[in-house]
Image (tube, rainbow, N blue to C red):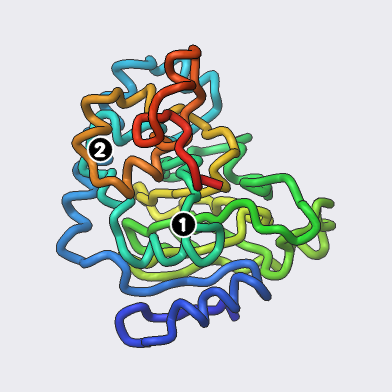
Amino acid sequence: MLARVDCKAQRDWLAKCCEAVRTQGCCIVDGVLAPSSLGEVRDAMYRAQERILAEVGAARLERAGERGVLRLMMKFEPRLLRFLELPELLAIVDEHVSPTAILHLQNGFILPPEPAGPADIFQQRFHQDFPRVLNGYLMSINAFFAIDEFTAANGATWVLPGSHQRGERPGEAELRTAQCVECGAGAMLVFDSTLWHCAGRNHSGKARLAINHQFTRSYIKQQIDYVRALGDSMILDLPARTQQLLGYYTRVVTSLDEYYRPGPERLYRSGQG
């Protein structure tokens, strides 16, 4: 049975979640997103999908083998940056990585119904989001939001509890004991990024929406340089903590002028890990 807590009903939800992540590698946190916000998030994701398709093109997306993956959604739909202000998410990041952690990625998923015939999709193969095991030192944590209900029928994530902090791929017999993460819309799946997991197959007849966040120690390179991708004008309109999470306080200097700026103006600020 997968560990789960209710962040609205249990005062000690964070401690219980941390213990579950330590022992099982994952925990379901119910009740994080208000039901009234989910429709707005879904609409934003579909708009972002249209913009990404227009910018990248269907042929390049198909060649990448990414069915329904939405990268850099926040560029087109800044509303999705508000996930970085959720107190439950920030508590998870601070407790598991550190208050100076940065966002490694925010990827959306609009998982379509399964097409006829076999499909070779990376997300549906067991993998680790952070395939580096460093003697138990936690470098990365995931916060995966169910925008739609997660069920076995609609391709919900499968996890292998206890497989975190192990570099070697589990054997096929062990992988067959993986469990499906079933939860209501608005829940957050927290997992150690070294946990072996995969997406399921969607046989529900309609798309399933989700958003994955991964946070790492501040010195790990991001999947996308969000500061450069979004631009200073957009970044500077955001709350200070969101700026920090996007990597604005851990930029690499490109000149002596940038290196010798006063402390508050430095690209890589002190105390960032």
Within-10-Å neighbours for mark 1: few <14, some 14–19, many 20+: some
> Which residue appears at 50% of the width and 41% of the height?
104
Q: What is the quadrant of residue 45 in the picture?
A: top left
**Position of 142 compared to 192: left or right?**
left
Q: Where in the figure is residue 138, as x and y percent of width and height?
A: 66, 58
Q: Which mark is residue 99?
A: 1
**Position of 172 compared to 203: left or right?**
right
Which residue is the site of mark 2?
46
| Closer-to-camera residue (225/175) | 225
Q: What is the quadrant of residue 97 in the picture?
A: bottom right
Which mark lies nearer to you, 1 or 2? 1
> Amino acid under label 1?
Pro
Secondary structure type for disc 2:
helix
Using the rendered image of the protein, determine whether residue 112 is visible from the camera's viewpoint.
no
Secondary structure type for disc 1:
loop
Please tell me whether residue 166 is drawn above or below residue 128 in the rendered image. Answer: below
